[in-house]
Image (cartoon, rainbow, N blue to C red):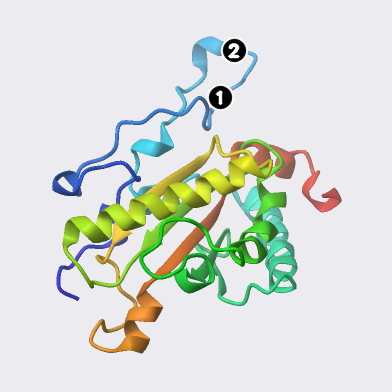
Amino acid sequence: MVLLLGVASILPAGVAAQNIFQKAANTISSWFSTGDKKDEATATEHIDITKLTLDENLSIPELDNKEARKIRAAQSREMKRLRKARLTDLKLVRNYEVIKATLAASNLFLPNDTMLSDKADIFLRPFLSDLRIPDYYHVMVVMHSDDTGSESYCLDLTRARAHAVRNWFASHGGNTDCMVLYEAGPFAPVASNATMEGRARNRRLDIYLIPGEKMIDMARRGQLDKR
């Protein structure tokens, strides 16, 4: 790794290369609130998830034991569904509460291109059902590149590609209000960039499905099993 940059420092798309260690200042309309919704005076202000680093978004929300059990079961069922849809690089992270899906960039884009290829539909469409219910998931879209080219080029490329993915979801009926984009550039490799195979592995899209407010509310009401 040329530069050690953990995912905690990866920022939402749109942040200039010179500000790679700063948090973005975008806003989002809603997030979690604690306290009784009947008492607006005691409700906690919603957090702007677009201002958070990837690691910060992956660490929240904290779930109680009952919520966690139901959400883990629901996430396990969703993993099985995604596996049936040609998605194979899937993991459950953060105590089995968050789904991480990794897609090769070659399945989405032609080399050095920022327009989605024709076959991208096959790999993105399975996620549409996860975006039908607003705030059911907080979706982190993290686009990576290899280290070929300048730092600014790699960041611009991954920024444009992340936006292309979000635009595809929005144009196909997905709710993207709780989607956060991260331009990772070459700074979080999973393999050596010294080989063609390693560079291919580094050119990837990571999608994280984090329980949203609606999903947690459904867990509290015992409605996840019915979905």
**Few, some or many residues within 10 Å of mark 1 (<14, 14–19, 20+):** few
Q: How would you rate the neighbour count of disc 2 (Cα within 10 Å): few for under 14, some for 14-19, many for 20 or more?
A: few
Q: Position of residue 207 (x, y in %)?
A: 51, 59
Which amino acid, by three-letter code, is at mark 2?
Asp
Q: Residue at x 40, y 62 (%)?
A: 113
Q: Are marks 1 and 2 in contact (CB under 8 Å)?
A: yes
Residue 24 horizontal side relative to residue 133, left or right: left
Residue closest to the eye, 51 or 197: 197
Q: Position of residue 32 (x, y in %)?
A: 53, 32
Residue 188 % position (x, y): 29, 67
Query: In which quadrant of the rendered view does residue 219 lie?
Result: top right
Quarter holding the N terminus? bottom left
Residue at 75% x, 73% y is: 84
Work out how far the residue at label 1 is from the one at label 2, CA to CA, in angstroms. 8 Å
Confirm whether residue 128 shows in the render: yes
Q: Position of residue 42 (x, y in %)?
A: 51, 15
Amino acid found under the numbered disc labelled 1: Gly
Q: Which residue is mark 2?
A: 39
Residue 206: image tag: none
Q: Is residue 63 visible?
A: no
Where, by quadrant of the figure, is residue 171 drawn?
Answer: top right
Labelled disc at residue 35: 1
Q: Tell me the residue at 43%/31% (across/down).
A: 47
User: Label 1's element?
Assistant: loop
Q: Determine whether, in the image, residue 4 is placed left or right of residue 78.
A: left
Q: Residue furthest right?
A: 226
Element type at marker 2?
loop
